[in-house]
Image: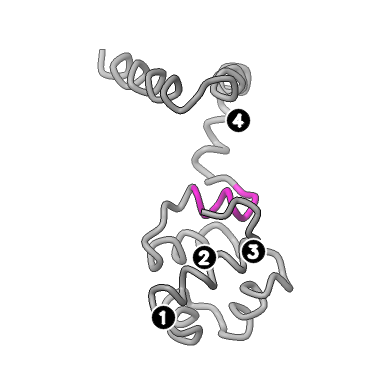
Amino acid sequence: MRSTERFGAFIRRQREARQISLREMASLVAISPAFLSKVELDEVPPPGEENIKAIARILELDPDVLLARAGKISSDLAEIIRRRPVETAALLRLAKRLDREGLVRVIKAAQRASKA
C-alpha cells in the first residue's frame, strides 16, 4: 500500500484493479458518477463516513483503513474517545511507542481482560 497516495487515487486504483466501472461503483455507493470522478481525481474532499464504508465493502477493504486514508475515524471510535478521553489518549500514546508485535500483545491482553 502506498502511504503517500491520495485518497481518490487510491480508491480509483483499487476500483480499476477489480474491474469495476466508475458508473457501476457510483451506483453501488448511491452517489453520482460525476461526484465519484471528482473524489477519485482529488478535486473534492473524501465523502462522508457511510459512503467511505460502502466503498470499503465494495472494494473488500478494511473500512477503518479507508477512513484513515480519508483523514477520518469511525463514529463509534469517536464516541469511545468522548466517553473516556483520558484513558483513550493514554492508550493511543502507548500504542504509538509500540511496534506491531507489542501492539498485538496489548490487544490480546485487553481482549482477555474484557472476557474476565
Percent position of residue 89, x then y = 62, 22
The residue under label 4 is: 82
Amino acid beneath label 3: Pro
Q: Rounded to the nearest whole Å, what is the CA distance between mark 4 and mark 2?
A: 23 Å
The residue under label 1 is: 20
The quadrant of the picture occupied by the C terminus is: top left
Occupied quadrant, residue 112: top left
Percent position of residue 19, x then y = 39, 80
Callout in the foreground (3, 4):
3
Q: Rounded to the nearest whole Å, what is the CA distance between mark 3 and mark 4?
A: 24 Å
Q: Which comes before the other along the chain, label 2 or label 3?
A: 3
Question: Magenta span has 89?
Answer: no
Amino acid beneath label 1: Ile
Identify the secondary structure beneath mark 2. helix
Callout in the foreground (4, 2):
2
Q: Are marks 4 and 2 in contact (CB under 8 Å)?
A: no
Q: Are marks 3 and 4 in contact (CB under 8 Å)?
A: no
Q: Which comes before the other along the chain, label 1 or label 2?
A: 1
Q: Which comes before the other along the chain, label 3 or label 1?
A: 1
Q: Rounded to the nearest whole Å, what is the CA distance between mark 4 and mark 1?
A: 38 Å
Disc number for residue 45: none
Callout in the foreground (2, 3):
3
The stretch in magenta equals 65-72
Identify the secondary structure beneath mark 4. helix
Q: Are marks 4 and 1 in contact (CB under 8 Å)?
A: no
Amino acid beneath label 4: Arg
The residue under label 3 is: 46
Question: Magenta span has 71?
Answer: yes
Q: Residue at x 54, y 78 (%)?
A: 31
Callout in the foreground (4, 1):
1
Residue 103's place in the image compared with 49, above or below, is: above
- 17 and 62: which one is in front? 17
